[in-house]
Amino acid sequence: MSQPSSIRRIKHASSLRAEVERALSAAIVSGELEPGALVSVPTLAAQFAVSATPVREAMLDLEKRGFVEPVRNKGFRVTHVGEDDLRQVVQVRRWLEVPAIGIVARSFPADRIDHYRELADRIVTAAAAADFPEYLAADTDFHLALMELTRNGRLVDIVADLRRQTRLVGLADMKNTVELKHSAQEHHALLDLLVEGRADDAEALMHQHIGHILGWWAGRTEN
């Protein structure tokens, strides 16, 4: 198995555990580490160039999220994605994020558009570079920033948690594809609609955008 690009030497930061978990999560979410893949703490520690402790702690955190399961005397195995579970996550996200983006469209702070454009540009740049850890981080920052405009902290927390549970196992296979570029550009298209106050169209685009989880990011074609 080739080494996923997400798993590379980590620059020492304030929390190695958090950095290791972020990198491993990105590799699993994007599909770089495929369902069923077996990984060991010593091997990962060597690839990250860190001690075994933060890697072991990160794996335990990922186990709590249901991303991996322990394999006695071998390490951890990446869990398979349940179709029903994924559909439920998509359904709940649509129930929450679609009407929320309509609310945002009706009072979007157009004078701060440059800030949101910068967030969207990060997504486009990461997609072009196939930097999946950065792509996922930028995507999360963008969407949560928009949800924050509802001024409902509980909504933001719930959406953040749902995003942490979302697996995009076909994302890694979308490298250098038209679909990946299109999905990244959808963030700018969404901002265009928000600036114009087109709530219904913004809701429709958000509904479609979240649906990529069951389409492109699941390795399926979309109409």
Image (cartoon, grey):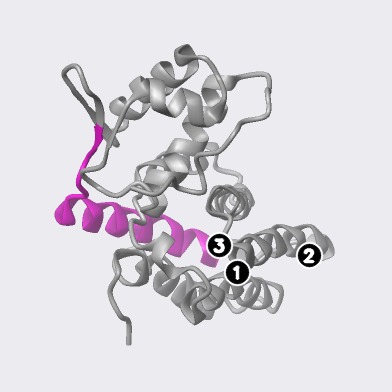
Upstream in the sequence, badge 1 or badge 2?
A: 2
Q: Residue furthest bottom?
A: 223
Q: Is residue 190 left or right of residue 172?
A: right
- The circle drawn on residue 103 is 3
Query: Which amino acid, mark 3?
Result: Ile
In the image, what residue occupies the spot 33% across and 56% down?
A: 169
Upstream in the sequence, badge 3 or badge 2?
A: 3
Visible residue check, residue 123: yes
Disc nearest the viewer among 3 and 1? 1
Front residue of 29/117: it is: 29
Please tell me whether residue 127 is drawn above or below residue 41 in the rendered image.
Answer: below
Front residue of 135/72: it is: 72
Label 1 sits on a secondary structure element that is helix
Residue identified by numbered label 1:
187
Please give the range of residues in magenta.
77-102
In the image, what residue occupies the spot 33% across and 47% down?
A: 1
Mark 1, Cα crowd under 10 Å, few <14 / some 14-19 / many 20+, is: many
- Measured as percent of width and height from the top left, residue 92 is found at 31, 53
Residue identified by numbered label 2:
113
Upstream in the sequence, badge 3 or badge 1?
A: 3
Q: CA distance from mark 3 to mark 1?
A: 17 Å
Query: Which amino acid, mark 1?
Result: His
Label 2 sits on a secondary structure element that is helix
Visible residue check, residue 158: no
Please tell me whether residue 158 is drawn above or below residue 146 in the rendered image.
Answer: above
Residue 109, image quadrant: bottom right
- Measured as percent of width and height from the top left, residue 210 is found at 40, 65
